[in-house]
Amino acid sequence: MVKAIYPGTFDPITNGHLDILSRAALLFEDVHVVVAVNVRKTTLFSLAERLELIRKCTSHLANVHVSSFEGLTVDCLRRFGAKVVIRGLRAVSDFEYEFQMALMNKKLDSGCETVYLMPSEQYTYLNSSVIREIAALGRSVSEFVPAEVEAKLRKKTGTHPKRPAKPPKK
């Protein structure tokens, strides 16, 4: 069987990420969720917090391992003895960037393969940035992230979920 990595910022991990990850865990011997360390990117959660949340959310997946990595994806592949990079594609707009990255990884390491997984339909619109914003504005994100992630988002943003405003009466 083949080992894979699933790299990303995961700030925070979403149900869409977990959907991709749970399916990847069925396809590969081992899947390493690799939290990217990027000093040029500002994150809401610290690296330690993101690692902790992902570990909690994936504890039921025996062949999933969680760690961090700074540097090139192809170097990360070598570190874990993996051959495959897992990437999620939500829409056609994701494809161009992901395709360029896959080609560059292949150029840097001819043994690198990229496998794209599409999230289940109910997760195609999810992204961590939008979820952070919704939570910061006091709306519930319970259908988008696991309960422990929502609790951490509430604590970080200092908000509590509000009910949606009722439309004005006609």
Image (cartoon, helix red, strand yellow):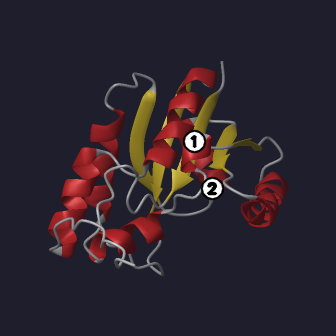
Q: Residue at x 41, y 35 (%)?
A: 65
Quarter of the picture holding the N terminus: top right
Q: Amino acid at mark 1?
A: Ile
Q: Are marks 2 and 1 in contact (CB under 8 Å)?
A: yes
Residue 5's disc is: 1
Between 163 and 34, the one nearer to me in the picture: 163
Q: Quadrant of the C terminus?
A: bottom left
Relative vertical location of residue 77 with respect to residue 98 in this rendering, above or below? above
Residue identified by numbered label 2: 73
Q: Which image quarter: residue 111?
A: top right
Judge by depth and name the residue closer to the eye, 145 or 67: 145
Quarter-wise, where is residue 150 in the image?
bottom left
Provide the secondary structure element on which disc 1 rests: strand
Residue 108: x and y, percent?
Answer: 78, 57
**Residue 46, picture quadrant:** bottom left
Which mark is first along the chain, 1 or 2?
1
